[in-house]
Image (cartoon, grey):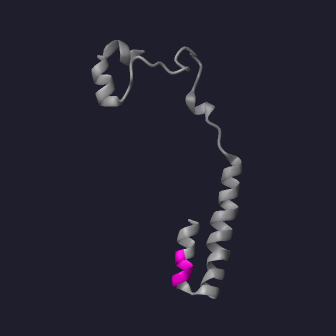
């Protein structure tokens, strides 16, 4: 509201990409903090931390290097990533 009241609509759009005709649904909720609405994705962090960062990088990479050699292992690891 403050931007819409103090800045012309053309400047809002061209400088900040704000469309003055569209108001977010949280505009009229005085105690809404968008940062509190976003929750961490614990399952995603757990899977990424244990599976990708640990298993794939440490175990699978060593296995592929031992079986296929470093050159082909790098190709396969790039495909996984």
9 displayed left or right of 56: left
Which residue lies at the image location 64% right of the left edge and 64% below the top edge?
Answer: 52
- Image quarter of the N terminus: top left
69 horizontally vs 6: left or right: right
Which residue is at 59% across, 67% downward? 80
List x then y, in percent, for residue 62.
63, 81
Query: Up-down: is 29 above or below 56?
Result: above
* Image location (x, y in percent) of residue 9: 31, 18
| Relative image position of residue 17 (x, y in whole percent) | 36, 29
Q: Residue at 32% across / 14% down in the picture?
A: 6
Q: In this view, does 37 lie above or below 70?
A: above
Q: Magenta includes 44? A: no
Out of 3 and 66, give the one closest to the viewer: 66
The image quarter containing residue 19 is top left
Specify whether 78 is left or right of 37: left
Looking at the rendering, the stretch of residues picked out in magenta corresponds to 71-75
Total labels: the figure holds 0
- Image quarter where the C terminus lies is bottom right
- For the stretch drawn in magenta, the main secondary structure is helix
Q: Where is residue 30 in the image (x, y as percent from the top left)?
A: 56, 16
Q: Which residue is pictured at 57% across the width and 80% down the height?
A: 73
Task: State the image quarter where residue 55 is shown.
Answer: bottom right
> On the picture, is 65 further left or further right than 7?
right
């Amino acid at each position: 509201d403050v931007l819409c009241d103090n800045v012309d609509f053309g400047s809002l759009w061209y400088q900040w990409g704000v469309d003055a005709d569209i108001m977010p649904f949280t505009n009229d909720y005085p105690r809404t903090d968008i940062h509190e609405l976003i929750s961490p994705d614990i399952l995603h962090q757990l899977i990424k931390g244990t599976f990708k960062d640990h298993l794939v990088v440490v175990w699978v990479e060593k296995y592929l290097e031992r079986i296929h050699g470093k050159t082909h292992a790098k190709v396969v690891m790039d495909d996984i990533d």
